[in-house]
């Protein structure tokens, strides 16, 4: 008799019986913004084909709100809800498994469990992976900030270091224990540094430490923060905000990290080697092409300089009209920025085109409409560049950011629940009161 190893996942035998007998199914690889929202849109609009979504994690990660989970403003079930919870009541079949190989010719997906599935349509929504650019020690000794588990690990490690620092006599060792280094000053690095600069001093104070001893150091290879980023209009606002936190963020710019060690960073700045001792190191310096996307059997001429496949205006792979793709794992010409709102809208377009395809109707080109850009710049401070025309900062910028992302949460019931909890906690009311 078969039995499920995980209570929240379908048995493999049950899934085979339910799904694998049909080649009419649409298989969605990746449960991020593009994958999840395309699946939900299909389900809500009575898509005629079977829908199978595969992700290696049991939880969706609403990445723009990971900072709120890190500093305790939001709970894990709000920011990282289980797929089974989000998909309850839909006709979407979810499988937690690891994709090992994608065969575009045979229209087959092979999984780590040994299962394989054929498809009529495939949706590639795998996102990217962390890019270390060959930096020695980076993968081994630096935290990443991509999931709820990452946020929890950073918080727990920081608290442990602070607790130890509160009992250390050696000032040099104590300085290292209370130093947090964030590598990479793109939007993730800037938002993370600002969040830590407001919350970490409070962690240290709980153990009787002097919160002024805490150091948050932001290291970037470029000579400025947010270089070449869609948020560049908010650069000056962000720089000012980083200096106005509970602990001002130290900027080390124009610095190339040459090695990461368990308790220090080697880098070169102005041609001179330098060392920063830090007990907590977080890597936010870039992304790389997902290995599965890199190994797709498509010619290099169908990829950009980074190895990401090009997609057509209707978001399917060149020469593979049955394979749709969106989000960070592919690109268009010109490319769209790597934003949640872009992935969200691309997921909707993919779903609409799958429905059109099933009805024999013409496909529609993707038309992304950017609302603007949003940055979290502290516990209750943010910046919003609304429709890239109006900059709103401070408490009001923070409120706009929060409400915008709460609106994007996956399901109306979940959206309502989280919004109600926020209002009950008084977070938004306090922000409005201080505007």
Image (cartoon, rainbow, N blue to C red):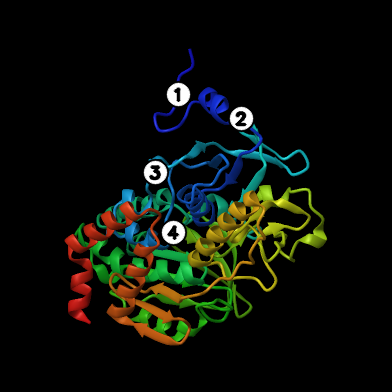
Mark 1 or mark 2: which comes first in sequence?
Answer: 1
Q: Which residue is mark 1?
A: 4
Element marked by disc 3: loop
Distance, label 4 to label 2, CA atoms, is 32 Å
Other-residue count near label 1 (Cα within 10 Å), few / some / many at <14 / 14–19 / ≥20? few
Q: Name the mark on residue 82.
A: 3
Distance, label 1 to label 4, CA atoms, is 30 Å
Left or right: where 285 falls relative to 281: right
Other-residue count near label 4 (Cα within 10 Å), few / some / many at <14 / 14–19 / ≥20? many
Q: Which residue is mark 4?
A: 63
Of residues 322 and 12, which is closer to you in this image? 322
Q: Which residue is mark 2?
A: 20
Element marked by disc 1: loop
Left or right: where 87 falls relative to 339: left
Please tell me which residue is depicted at 53% across the width and 59% down the height of the picture: 348
Element marked by disc 4: helix
Other-residue count near label 2 (Cα within 10 Å), few / some / many at <14 / 14–19 / ≥20? some
- Residue 126, given in percent of the width and then of the height, sits at 59, 51
Select label 3 or label 2 by which is in front.
Answer: 2
- Residue 242, given in percent of the width and then of the height, sits at 38, 78
Of residues 335 and 71, which is closer to you in this image? 335
Select label 1 or label 2 by which is in front.
Answer: 2
Distance, label 4 to label 3, CA atoms, is 14 Å
């Amino acid at each position: 008799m078969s039995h499920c190893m995980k209570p929240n996942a379908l048995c493999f035998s049950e899934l085979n019986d339910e799904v694998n007998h049909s080649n009419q199914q649409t298989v969605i690889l990746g449960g991020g913004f593009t994958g999840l929202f395309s699946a939900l849109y299909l389900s809500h609009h009575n898509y005629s084909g079977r829908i199978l979504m595969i992700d290696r994690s049991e939880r969706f990660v609403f990445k723009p709100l990971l900072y709120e989970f890190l500093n305790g403003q939001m709970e894990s079930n709000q920011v990282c809800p289980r797929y089974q919870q989000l998909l309850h009541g839909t006709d979407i079949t979810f499988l937690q498994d690891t994709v090992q190989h994608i065969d575009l010719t045979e229209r087959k997906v092979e999984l780590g469990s040994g299962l394989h599935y054929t498809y009529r349509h495939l949706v590639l929504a795998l996102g990217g992976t962390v890019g270390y650019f060959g930096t020695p020690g980076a993968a081994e000794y630096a935290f990443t900030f991509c999931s709820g588990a990452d946020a929890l690990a950073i918080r727990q490690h920081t608290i442990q270091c602070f607790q130890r620092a509160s009992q250390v006599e050696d000032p040099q060792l104590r300085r290292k224990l209370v130093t947090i280094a964030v590598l990479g000053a793109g939007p993730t690095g800037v938002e993370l540094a600002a969040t830590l600069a407001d919350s970490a001093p409070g962690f240290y104070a709980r153990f009787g430490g002097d919160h002024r001893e805490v150091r948050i150091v932001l290291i970037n290879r470029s000579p400025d923060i947010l270089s070449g980023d869609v948020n560049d209009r908010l650069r000056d606002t962000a720089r000012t905000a980083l200096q106005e936190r509970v602990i001002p963020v130290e900027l080390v710019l124009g610095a190339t990290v040459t090695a990461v060690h368990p308790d220090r960073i080697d880098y070169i700045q102005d041609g001179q080697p330098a060392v920063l001792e830090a007990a907590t190191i977080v890597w936010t310096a870039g992304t790389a092409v997902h290995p599965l996307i890199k190994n797709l059997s498509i010619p290099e001429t169908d990829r950009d300089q980074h190895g990401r496949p090009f997609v057509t205006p209707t978001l399917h792979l060149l020469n593979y009209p049955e394979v749709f793709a969106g989000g960070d794992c592919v690109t268009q010409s010109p490319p769209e920025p790597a934003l949640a709102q872009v992935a969200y809208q691309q997921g909707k377009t993919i779903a609409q085109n799958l429905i059109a395809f099933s009805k024999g109707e013409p496909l529609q080109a993707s038309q992304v409409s950017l609302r603007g850009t949003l940055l979290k710049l502290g516990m209750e401070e943010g910046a919003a560049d609304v429709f890239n025309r109006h900059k709103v900062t401070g408490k009001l910028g923070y409120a706009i950011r929060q409400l915008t992302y709460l609106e994007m949460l996956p399901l109306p019931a979940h959206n309502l629940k989280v919004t109600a909890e926020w209002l009950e906690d008084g977070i938004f009311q306090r922000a409005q009161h201080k505007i």
